[in-house]
Amino acid sequence: MAYPLSRLGVLVKAAPEKDADGYLRETKKTGMIEKDLGTGDYAVMLFAGGTPVSAYILKDGGAKTLSTSEFTAFPSKSAGEVRVIDLSDVAGRLARLAFESRQVARAAIQDAEDWRRHIERWQRENWSGLVEVSSPGLYGMALFWRGGAQKADMIFSNEGGILTETFGFESPNGFPWEVSAFAFDESDPAYQCAALRYAVVDWTNMILARYQELVGHKLLETLEQELNRQIQPWEWKIALGRAAITDSHFFIHPKDAETAYRALFMSMGMLMDIVIGSALTRRLLKETFDLLNPADIRLLTSLRLIPAAFSE
Amino acid sequence: MKKMDHVKKTTILGIPPRQILIGGVSMAFALLAVLSWQYFAALQNDIDAFWDGQFFNYITLVPAIGAALAGSAVTGQFVRGERPHRIWVAFSLGLWFWVAGEISVILFDFFPAGIVSPDFQLVDIFWLLGYFSLGLSLVLQLLSAYGMGQRRGLSIYAGMVVFAIILAALLTEIVRKGKPDDSWSFLFVTILYPVLDVLAGGTAIWLSLLFGRGRWSRPWWGLILFAITDAIDAFYWSGGYDLVSVAAQNTLDFISLVTYPASYMTAGLALLANYFILRYGMESGLLKPARESGLAKRGME
C-alpha cells in the first residue's frame, strides 16, 4: 500500500513531538504516531482511545508488525518528522484492518461506469474485504461485508479534509482512481472484531425492529434512550436510535467487544422483559437470531451470545 | 469510568406515577369494599331490592369510564400506521361501547324506549359491539406477538366471529328443546355471551401466558375477570342455580358482583400504567428492573 493513511485523520499540531504517545494516552484519543524514516518507508503506531494497539513498518507497499520497543527504536528522519494524527475510531479500525490485510487486487478505475462494474462484481461474489481508493484529490477506505459497502465503515478525505455526508460512494467523480482490494486474515483480531460487530449489529437491528412492531416507537425510544444512558459511563462509541445500532467504537481485542455486546444484550433483554414479559422476549430474541446469516449464528453461538443468555 | 447519570423521576401535580397507581388500586379496593358491605347488608335484609337498585350500576360505571379514558390515553400515544395503534384503538373502542352499555342499563330504568325488542335490547347492541371490538384487539395483539400479517389476522378474526355465531346458534337449538317457551332470539343472545366469553377469555389467557408478567399485556387480565363474571351469569341463566345450595348461590353472586367492576378496574389501572410508561418512559419509575445487571450493574461499579 502506498502510505497516505494519515490522510484519514487530522494532524495534531499541538502534540509534543518528543512525547507523542503521552499525548494520545493522556487525551485518551484514537490516533496514530507516524515516523518518516527518510527512505520512503514509514513506521506507525496505532492507538485506540489512548491505548497502544500495534505498530507497523510500511515498506514496499506492505505492512509488517513491529513490537512497541522496535517502533520506539526506529529513528525518524529528523525530530520534526514524528507526527501525531488524530483519527476517528472508524478510521482507526479501518487503518488497522488495512495494515493486517493482504492486497489481492489493484486496478485503475477510469470512470463511474467502471467503478459501478467493480461494485457489482463484489456484490455478486458476496465479497468481504477492504477497498482503498486513491487519487490526487481523494483518498479513502471502505469496508465491504458480504458484498455490500458498509456506510458505517467508510472514510474518505480530500484536500479540504475528512468527507462526511458529502461523498457519494456510489456516484462518485474525480477519476481516474487507483483502487486496491485487501482480503482479510480471519485469524486477525481486527477482522474478528469486525465480524463480531456485523453479527451484533444485524441481530440488534432485527431485535429493535421487531420490538418496535410489538410496542410502537415510543417504547422503542425509551429502550434506546435507557441503553444509551447505560452505555455512557463505559465511553463506548455505541449508540442506539431509530431502531438501529451504530457501533463506531474501536475495540482492540475481540474479547473487549464481546464483553460490551454481552452487557448490552443483557440490559436490552431485561428492559424488554419488563414490558413484554420474559417468554415473549425470549421468543423475540430467538426468532430474530434464527434469521441471522448462518456464519453469524455460528460466531455468536461460539461466544455464548445467544437468546437464552439474555432473557430470564 | 464515569458514573452513570440517574434517571429523573417525573411527577404529575407533584405525585409520582407509581403513587398515582397505588392510589388507584386503593380506591378500587375501597369501592369493592363498599360494594361488598352493601351486598352483605342487603343479604341480611332485602337482597332483591339490592339487585333491583342502581347502586351496583353506578359503582360499576366509575371504573368503566376510567378504563375507557385510560384506553384512549394509551391509544393517543401511538401514531396512525403503527401496529399497536390499531390494537389499542379496537381495545378502547370496545371499552367505550361497554361504557355505553353500562349507561344504557342505568337509563333503561328511566327510558323503557331503550328497548329494541322484548328479546334484544339496546344494551345488547353495545355489549356485542364491545365484544367484537375487544375480540379484534385481542386477535391483532396475538398476531402481532407471533409476527403474523394483519390481513391474515382479519381473516382469522372473521373466522372466529362466524364460528362463535354458528356455535351459539347450534347451542340455542339444543337448549330450546328444553325451553320451548323462550324465544329463539332471546336464547341465542343469552348463549352468545358465554360463547364470546370463552373465546375472549381463552385468548386473553393465551396472551397473558405469552406475555407472562410483562406490563404490556396486563390490560387483558381485565377480560379474564369478565369471562369469570359472565360464566357465573351464564350458569344462572341456564338454570344452574337450581342445582346448587343457597349458600353456593350467594357465594357465586358475590364473586360475580366483585369481579365485574374489578375487571374494569384491572383493565383501567393496567392501561393507566401503560400510559405512564408510554408518556414518561423510564422517568415514570415503572420500568426499573428488579436487579441491576448488564450495562447498569457494571456502570455502578
Image (cartoon, rainbow, N blue to C red):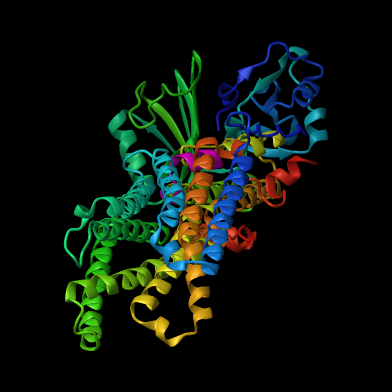
> Which of B261/A80 is in front?
B261
**Vertically, is A86 above or below B3?**
above
> Does residue B236 lie above or below B36 as drawn?
below
In the rendered image, the quadrant that contains the C terminus of chain B is: top right
B108, above or below A9, in the image: below
Q: Is residue A126 above or below residue A280?
A: above
Outermost residue toward the front?
A: B45
Q: Main secondary structure of the magenta part?
A: helix
Which residues lie in the magenta part? A213-223
Q: Is residue A185 visible?
A: no
x and y percentages locating residue B66 in the rendered image: 45, 45
**In the picture provided, is A64 more to the left or to the right than A276?**
right
- Viewer-closest of A33 and B286: B286
Give the camera-side residue of A116 and B165: B165
* Location of residue A32 in the rendering, given as x and y in whole percent from the top left corner: 68, 26
* Residue A5 horizontal side relative to residue B121, left or right: right
Say which quarter of the image contains residue B207: bottom left
Q: What percent of the width, then of the height, locates residue A291?
A: 44, 59
For image coordinates 52% across by 68% down, the residue present is B43
One can see residue A178 in this view: yes
Residue drawn at the location 59% of the way across and 58% of the way down:
A300
